Image (cartoon, helix red, strand yellow):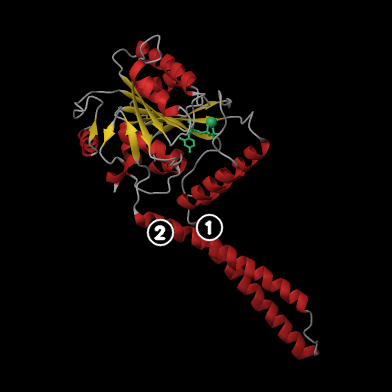
Amino acid sequence: TAHASAERESRNIVDSAGGACPDRQVTLSVVVPCHNEEACLPLFLSAAAQAVREIIVAYPGTTAELVLVDDGSTDSTVALLRQAATSGDGHTAFPFVVRWLSLSRNFGKEGALLAGLDVAQGDVVAVMDADLQDPPSLLPRMFAMLADDPTLDCVATRRTTRAGEPPVRSMCAHMFYRLMNAMSPVAVPDGARDFRMMRRRVVDALTSLTERNRFSKGLYAWVGFHTEWIDYPNTRRAAGKSNWNFFSLTRYAIEGLISCSTVPLAVASYIGLLLCAVAFGATCFIAVRAAMFGDPVAGWPSLACIITFIGGLQLMCLGIIGRYLANTYLESKRRPNYIVRDGNISIRDAGNTRF
Ligand code: UDP
Ligand code: MG
């Protein structure tokens, strides 16, 4: 659409030849954030090539690009991206143009994803992981669903099983989705992946959200649009190891909840109110008992307990308020979500022009 192309122009996308990008029509973009994926990338590239070839056979005239975003990798990921962009996979030409960006440091998956979405030119954009946990073999089916149904805006995926994952992680994940859906106005199905294929209008909606604290699954749900789900069983990482540990996942969960809901703030005040009521009742009870029966008010240990309990609760509530305050502070700084260091797409200050 005119809006989309104006938008893209305003972001100064210049193609690898160095000239301003002509109206090159790309039908499909596949955006992939990569952090230390040297072990998976070669496998991913050939699987993605296979899938895109299938799409081109089924829908001749389709042009595709692969947008690879290196998220501050410390291994040979960048070298692999550079190589993929210049020499294909060595044997056969890729059925897509490889465009890549390298961020100035590790900004986290959300930052890398946004960078990819910002530069993707496709009418249809897919986002997926590099580790083959999002099977590229689903791409043709997703593309066909969008191509054949003009009323559909987005095809999303969800895992039906979490086989092969540490049980503690699955349990925490289930709990997280329960909490998330109870607290936030938009629904994120349990098992939802970031793996999805969207029409341009959905991508434009997503990239127009300027918040710092991005929780993609919440944002996908928030922007709405007509979405259909594909279910598939969990697949293990092809190689390498997960970039997440217990602490980073916990942080991700808390950030997710806080970015999508203000219910925790309300919970804090309700707990406070409830405790005030309880304390007031107890005080009345003790005072009446002392006045009527002359009971001495004894028991400093119980008092100490109560003080500690209330002190703890106050700290908890302050903590919750603090999280929101911290978020407001971060948002108010209006820093970009990512900074581009290198790549074969030169976007003048990609991250910095967002605000
Ligand atoms: N990733 C990233 N930046 C990060 C962490 C991860 O770009 O800081 C990418 C990673 O390369 C992969 C995807 O995000 O393509 C999912 O990461 P991972 O497989 O480690 O997560 P898991 O599947 O264990 O949730
Ligand atoms: Mg993975």
Judging by the rendered image, the residue that carries numbered circle 2 is 329
Instruction: Relative to 292, say whether 254 is above or below.
Output: above
Residue 99's spot in the image, x, y percent?
33, 26
The CB of the residue at mark 1 lies under 8 Å from ligand 1: no
Q: Is residue 346 visible?
A: yes
Q: Residue at x 27, y 45 (%)?
A: 353
Instruction: Relative to 181, say whether 270 is above or below.
Output: below
Specify which label sits upstream in the sequence, 1 or 2. Answer: 1
Residue 120's spot in the image, x, y percent?
32, 31
Instruction: Relative to 211, say whether 124 is above or below.
Output: above
Residue 71's spot in the image, x, y percent?
43, 36
Q: Quadrant of residue 16?
A: top left
- Please identify the quadrant where the N terminus is shown: top left
- For this view, does 148 lie left or right of residue 36? left
Q: CA distance from mark 1 to mark 2?
A: 18 Å
The CB of the residue at mark 2 lies under 8 Å from ligand 1: no
Q: Quadrant of residue 63?
A: top left
Judging by the rendered image, the residue that carries numbered circle 1 is 264
Say which amino acid is labelled 1. Pro
Q: Residue at x 41, y 37 (%)?
A: 112
> Crowdedness of circle 1 by 10 Å Cα count: few (<14), some, many (20+)?
some
Q: Quadrant of residue 166?
A: top right
